[in-house]
Amino acid sequence: MKQRKIKSWQWVLIVLSFLIALDWAIRRPDAQTRQLNAVLVDKASPQLKAYPYQFRVLRVEGNTVVMSTPRNFDVPAFRMLAVLYPDINVKDNNNPKFIEVERLLGHVQDEAKDIVLGEPGIASVRWELDRDWLRRHGIAVPDKR
């Protein structure tokens, strides 16, 4: 019986497939995270469902939920709001439209947090900057500290 040799391009394909599967297994949310994300979708108001950024549970650490956010001290809200609402002057803090969309962002983020905090066994929420979403929308993101 003659054995066939695996060619180098086939090895590359095998290793690449393995790395993709490993990345998927690492990033795949656990059952509790999936359940909390489902609750978030089910209980969300029409306003939260329609918001251009979808808040989600990334993971659960004990009784603390880590959720995604497009803003923090490193990436202020005006940067992502400029992408979502390009017709609004987000550099003018007194612009009524800017104030309105900034308040809406805070409102929908609070709603997402409150939905998750209403679930049994969840005591707190910690926000984590959604670097992938920001990069996909052309927003410069500082390196993790």
Image (cartoon, rainbow, N blue to C red):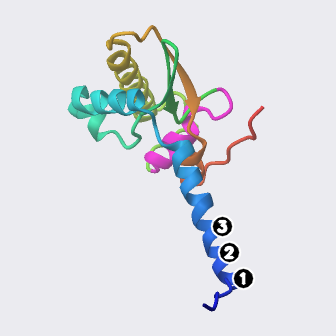
Percent from the top left, x then y, of residue 48? 30, 32
In the picture of the structure, the residue carrying the numbered disc 1 is 8
Which label belongs to residue 15? Answer: 3
Residue at 40%, 19% in the rendered image? 113
Residue type highlighted by circle 1: Ser
Question: Which numbered disc, 3 or 1, marks the residue that appears first in the sequence?
Answer: 1
Left-right relation of 17 to 120: right
Q: Eyeballing the image, is 53 above or below 105?
A: below
Percent from the top left, x then y, of residue 19? 62, 59
Residue at 58%, 29% in the rendered image? 128
Residue 89 in sight here: no
| Tag 3 near tag 1, CB within 8 Å | no
In the picture of the structure, the residue carrying the numbered disc 2 is 12
Q: Quadrant of residue 136?
A: bottom right
Residue type highlighted by circle 2: Val
Question: Callout 1: helix, strand or loop?
Answer: helix
Q: Nearer the viewer, residue 61 or 93?
A: 61
Q: Quadrant of the C terminus?
A: top right
Q: CA gap, disc 1 to disc 2? A: 6 Å
Question: Callout 2: helix, strand or loop?
Answer: helix
Other residues around mark 1 within 10 Å, as few (<14) / some (14–19) / many (≥20)? few
| Tag 1 near tag 2, CB within 8 Å | yes
- Look at the image and give the residue range highlighted in magenta: 73-86
Residue type highlighted by circle 3: Val
| Tag 3 near tag 2, CB within 8 Å | yes
Other residues around mark 2 within 10 Å, as few (<14) / some (14–19) / many (≥20)? few
Which label belongs to residue 29? Answer: none
Q: CA gap, disc 3 to disc 2? A: 5 Å
Residue at the far front: name it: 1
Q: Quadrant of residue 120?
A: top left
